[in-house]
Image (cartoon, rainbow, N blue to C red):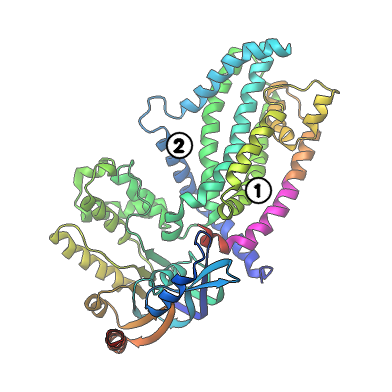
Amino acid sequence: MRRDPHYISDAFGDISLALKSRSLWMALGWNDVRSRYHRSKLGAFWASLSILIFVSALGPIYSNLLGISLREYTTHLMLGLMLWGYISSIVLESGREYINSTNYLVSFRLSYFTLLMRVVWRNLVVFLYQLIVFIVLALVLQLPITISWIIAPFALLAITMAALWMALLMSVFATRFRDLSELVNNLLRLVFFVTPIMWIPSPNTQLSLVADLNPFYHLIEVFRSPVLSGDINLQNWIVVSAMLFVGWLLAFPVFAAFRSRIAFWL
Amino acid sequence: MPSIKLDNVSLDFPVYDAESRSLTTSVTKLMPIGGTIRRSNGKRTSILALDNISLSLEDGDRVALLGHNGAGKTTLLKLLSGFYEPTSGSINCNGKVSALLELMSGMDLNMSGQENIILCGMLHGLDKREIIRRRDDIAEFSELGDYLTMPVRLYSSGMMLRLAFSICTSIDCEILLLDEWVGTGDQAFIKKAHERLSELIFRSAILVFATHDRTVAKRLCNKAVFLEHGKALMYGDIDDVLAYSEQVYLDSLKG
């Protein structure tokens, strides 16, 4: 019964309705950011500031410890934290999004994907606030601005698409199995330490193998590497493309099969 | 032409956090409250909230949903609004649906009245231009004046209700779903509100209205469905169904 074609077309309808209601999820996502920092003087710049505080405290110590120049380490760390925060928040927050928005789903004709786009949008806003501060930092540290920077928006798009299929899977299963959010939260914390964010793999070592086998490393590198070193690494893009292909091939049918059950799990 | 067609629709609702106790099942069977609670192998609990309902509604139908608490009235509305999909049977809904099930939903307490008008309008599926066109009308009807620039959390509950009501009755639709309309607020506003609601009902092609209030049902509707345990026991002319439900009530008193 679940392989019935109308499940597939309903799921496409869900996604296309979301793409049509762009102004809605942009407004909802923006409101989320605003209410999170409601009445604070710095507003969403707190998201930038907290990363900056972390980086400036850790940067001098770890760059010394790892024997890397301060400029290289702080920019690597800051961009890594920003991208990691972006990806992991989208995935984790999607696990609670339908549950938190039950009253919206009951009262309005909202598609589930609209709510995921709301999650993406609020995290994108935070990311862009952080990016402003990163650019200031890059200018202060005299990081060379290269032509490769133009790849960054495309990399961010690829990262978002990858985070979205993970969010789609997460949103379905975490709504049904309420333990999943906590489990994934713990797993992601482990992945954070395995992924080269706090550390930098030197080429052709065992550590570089650990990095290369980690898809999240490639996901971060498609953005970070062109911005920091001007290199566009083909291997990163191949892995990310494969992730997008396999991920969507897996996530979309799962979403289509269970979409009509989600309302019963709320 | 707006229409709604339900064919043998059932909704079997899984319950994941209920304890399996056999006593409750036997008690609820005797009383006319709620859907049938089902357990398979003593493990999986589910509620049969709607049981094999077939209905066909057309342009001009004003249908009252009558029945006891938990008979399936709100569940049926949520099915018609598209929130639930039937677990068996099929539903065919033609026309733009507007479901006024919870008046306050969509309101953000930290935002001003004006911002809430825009947000709720968007949630109802209007684009920015349409909302701006209706904004003044909504503001005027709510009579909130300068309070519309204040955060909604500073409003009294009556003021919130004014705003919410003004917003959701300004949305045009073909199929209007109304859940039990509770009238609070001051007397003058209730009168105004009823007029506005009647206009909205007049503008829409089909109305489905869940209620316990027989006089309101008779005033607003021309047809009715009597639900019990999720079954549509009777569907037809409002007077016939009201008479039938009266009879069912009297029978239940006799035991």
Q: Secondary structure at mark 1?
A: helix
The image's mark for residue B54 is none
| Relative to B20, residue B52 above or below | below
Direction from residue A246 to residue A183 in the image, left or right? left
Residue at mark 1: A165
Amino acid at the residue labelled 1: Trp
Which residue is rendered at x = 50% and y = 28% of the image?
Answer: A47
Amino acid at the residue labelled 2: Val
Q: Report the span colored magenta.
A: A244-260
Is residue A248 a member of the stretch shown in magenta? yes
The residue lying furthest to the front in this view is B23
Q: Secondary structure at mark 2?
A: helix
Where residue A195 appears, x then y in whole percent? 71, 30
Residue at mark 2: A33
Whether callout 1 and callout 2 share a subunit is answered yes
Which quarter of the figure is the N terminus of chain B placed in? bottom left
| Relative to B86, residue A112 above or below | above
Which residue is rendered at x = 60% and y = 54% of the image?
Answer: A172
Is residue A250 a member of the stretch shown in magenta? yes
Which residue is rendered at x = 62% and y = 50% of the image?
Answer: A168
